[in-house]
Image (tube, coloured by chain):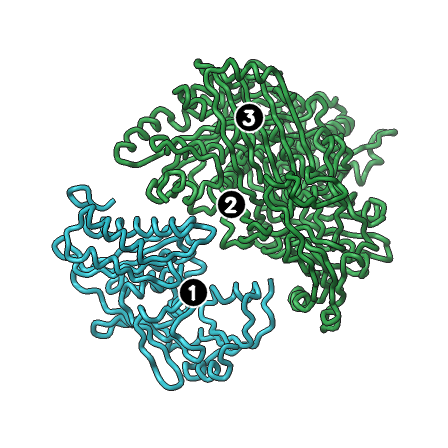
Amino acid sequence: MKASAFSYARATSVANALELLVAYGDKAKVLSGGQSLMPAMNLRLISPELIVDIGEITELRGIAVRGDILSIGALTRHVDLLRSPEIAAHAPLLTEAAAHVAHPAIRNRGTLGGSLAHADPASELPASVVALNATIVVSGQTGERRIAAGEFFTGIYETALSAQELLIAVEVPVAQKNSAHFFHEFARRHGDYAIAGLAAQAIVQAGLFTELRAAFFAVGDRPILAKAATKLINIRITPAVLAEASATLGEELDPQEDQQASAAMRRHLAKILLARCASALLGPPAAGGPV
Amino acid sequence: MTVASANPDRLTVLDRPNSYIGKVVPRPNLERLMQGRGLYVSDMELPRMAHVVFLRSPHAHAKIIGIDAVEARRMPNVIAVVTGRELATVITPWVGVLSHLKGLKSAPQHAIAIDRVCWQGEAVAAVVATSRAVAEDAAESVRVEYQELDAVTDMRAALDPETPVIHPSLGDNLAFERNLDAGAVDAAFAESDEVAEADFIFGRHTGVTLEPRAVVADWNIAEQRLTVYQGTQAPHMVQNIAALHLGLADSQVRVVCKDVGGSFGIKVHIYADEMATYALSKLLRRPVKFVADRVESFNTDIHARDHRCKGRIGVKRDGTITAFEIDDLTGIGPYSMYPRTSAIEANQVVNLVGGPYRTKNYRARARVVFQNKNLMCQYRAVGHPIACSVTEGLVDLVASKIGMDPVEIRRRNLIADDAYPCASPSGLRFEQLSHHAAMSKLMTMMGYDALRAEQTALRKKNIHHGIGIASFIEVTNPSAAFYGVGGARISSQDGVAVRLDATGSVICQTSITEQGQGSESLTAQIVGSVLGVSMERVRVILGDTDNTPYGGGTWASRGAGIGGEAALQAAKILRKNVLDIAATILQSSPAELDIVNNAVVTASDGSPRIELRELARIVYFRPDTLPPGIQAELMATRHFVPREYPFAFTNGVQASWIEVDTDTGFVKLLKHWVVEDCGTIINPQLVDEQIRGGVVQGLGAALFEKCIYDERGQLTNANMADYLVPMSGEMPDIDVGHVVSPTTESELGAKGAGEAGTAGAAAAVANAVNDALKPFGAIITEIPLTPQVILTALGRI
């Protein structure tokens, strides 16, 4: 279990990293926290010619609030997400999601940018940024692009990021008054990739959802922003309402089958998650509400 | 920890002032290992040492048409690429059969496959280079042409006439069959008020050791001697087997076992890649290192427990169990493992089913079949989890049918604590077990009635908790009955040599081995206690065929009971020798003297007479001052093997308290209890941690661990992300209690404790899950109990 020989470059700046990425294209891989890249290389699933280590690029670090935007550098480690007071105040969904990412040793190394660029459909942070309606900022030699999180993830390990671009930051709208969030995942063990998970951001007023962005993960090839959530907007949630939303959710999801769960089981768990989200954020309804 | 001695008045040589027996003392090797100063095989570097990587078959069953290694051989720093045919000039094949398992058959297995591969992961070539990385690079450029053959993967179809026979020379795919019919089973079922039956399915899993299998083999052509550094549980067995197949005398092979990062039975076998490594060292005349990587470990470390067992139980309305019947089927891969064979687990299942209970009516059939998957063999608690899950699952099923509480039906059927000695229907002889005392203790520890009340209250809130109970028996301290009688050169006796050195310290050489369970500690505790020497003065040497007495090693829960007794007897002799000399020096008599705290004292009042240091000085440097004719002997050796009973059976009972989320199928382990009886407890902490570690491996089987093969014989989850080992986050608190019934076969009175935890944990959890699901009418007799399995049983998906 040794990686094939590769060349290594420690990029000194974003511009320097981009030069290397343009020169090597698909043959280069960006090393951020290395928590997915290194195992894949050691298993010889991938054998890049060049590793571009961006770990020393200070401009990719930092968490800052600018107006109503929370900007998070791509190199922000999961442990920093977990501990940041700014994130806890303005995007608590991320704080909660980060706690579900693997184990402390991995959270100490893994980065937000790395997780998003890797785009594992079962991981927590891609769904969270979709739920938060965040913007992914990428840099290329022709300048920066801003991509809505909902447009960024295009498939299993596939994103709108080209091989010549670098993900540099994530911009999250700061939480508004009355905002609420829900995060839960079903995993066989603490720290495992989820069998099914939900990251949701909502606005709750007078016991109703006025807004609900429910991003499911591990139930498709990318985070799925459920259209079924619209069935729960501005309506008193009764068992019938929930059943209709659940049915819609079941129809719009097309989950994969794997060793942990059949497609039917994933669909079932997604429905449970939607119900538990409603129950957690609106409280148990009076007359036999969400389970 | 709580201990209740069944025999508190029994005073032995161990009940001495300053005894370490029954005390928690730190392990002598703790600091060394905690400071990272251990020496594992992976740490070893020898001059001119090469690294071998095995190119392994991607197919479950295929003919090898050709191997093209021209490019690999040309690569820089590649020393050799060796095929099976080339290696066969150095090492002979083997057949994993033993004569006491009548009818067991297998085919010759080579260190590296020659014409044909029989499982995905079997080695087809060895690539030897100056580093592992170079060898891996070279292995990628070796081209092997295969012709795929039909793979036999489903054990249920292995015996069908249309299924290909893996080894045509054997005639069929049946490796072994055993039938047993005791008592009057048909009549017993006919007279039963209720009969329950079920198919129990067990997932194939493996013992994931923290340190993988690792070996450095060093053939010294000048000495004509092979030194094997290996993390093994049985150094003398490895010595014998390596010598046998390399055409050497045993004396030409030395096996050294340094620190070992976990074994669990995984490292008690002879693996083809390890044999190949010995042979490569001989062929290439230099040290060769093989360290399995994690993918190789999953594909080649023995698997276990792939069983499907039909079970049937009869009961009278008063709860009396009338009969057990089982039909067990297991698939062991393409060969019977060498040299302990792959028939032992099924054989144990036949032996152990119904073991805790009184009924004499028992019928069993076990069939062991070949298939194109990795080999199966003995892993911690061989056969016990299967037998316990079937027995205890059936007991719960039938109790439910007659509306009897699971504890009550067990109390009515467990062999009475005063009924010993006695024997099971399968012929197992029990010296002294304590099922009822253990059950009573368990009830107190867990607060059974209060838990039942809590369960009832929670049901009303739609929260579903379950209680599962599992009584078990455990095979420990095996005599020659296990392997020796079948012709295996695997020692069932162990030896210990103890010597007092010139400064009054003690060197102790033992043939048992240390893989983390505390063999070193328990040996020092026994020797220190018996001699009257403080433990820090006792140095224990293990794991070296040149430097320890001949013996079996550490497996099948034999280290403490057998090796510990040898240590006790050797220390007793040395103590006598020391007192004889002391009496001469002090002009006293040995009977008036004792050794306490590193000094000879007057036995009656403890007054100090002569320090051991001073006595040793006289013996070694001034023997001229001793009376004429005195020849002091400050080294003593004793060996021990149980002679009266083939096995020292132990017993115990486990309980599990769980919650099932009936919406999601997830099981939460809330609490686990074990009461067990391993006789004399030498170090309570070591015993408790053996129990807890064993339970965790059993919980892994119950909920998480499974080697998932596809229909073509591909292992699809051979990594630590997809193969789920139990992790601390999911583990419950595990309370351990003891009943103490020492064996009278030895002065020490210790039986084994290594299998107990694993034996009953899965059965307890499965019974608890079924208890939780009772209102839903769902019964599950399959492990692992995954959310998918549970949701399916509940009809939710």
Task: Give the spatial CA distance, label 3 vs label 2.
Answer: 25 Å
Chain containing the residue with disc 3: B
Task: Give the spatial CA distance, label 1 vs label 2.
Answer: 26 Å
Residue type pointed to by label 2? Glu
User: Which comes before the other along the chain, label 3 or label 2?
Assistant: 3
SS for callout 2: loop
Residue A118 in the image: x percent, y percent?
Answer: 43, 67
Residue B307 in the image: x percent, y percent?
Answer: 57, 37
Q: Looking at the image, can residue B493 be seen?
A: no
Closer mark to the observer between disc 1 and disc 2: 1
Q: Looking at the image, can residue A229 be seen?
A: yes
Left-right relation of B709 to B791? right
Indicate which disc residue B705 carries: 2
The cyan-coloured chain is labelled A
Residue type pointed to by label 1? Ile
**Front position in the image: B547 or B759:** B759
Q: Identify the residue shown where x is 40% and y is 54%.
A: A194
Task: Give the spatial CA distance, label 3 vs label 1.
Answer: 52 Å
The green-coloured chain is labelled B
Q: Is residue A22 above or below residue B687?
A: below
Q: Is residue A33 above or below residue A240?
A: below
Residue type pointed to by label 3? Asn
**Front position in the image: A261 or B457:** A261
The local crowd at label 3, few if under 14, some if 14 to 19, many if 20 or more residues have their Cα within 10 Å, is: many
Tags 3 and 2 both on a single chain: yes
Residue A111 in the image: x percent, y percent?
Answer: 40, 67
Q: Which residue is mark 1?
A: A156
Q: Identify the residue shown where x is 44% and y is 82%.
A: A18
Indicate which disc residue B651 carries: 3
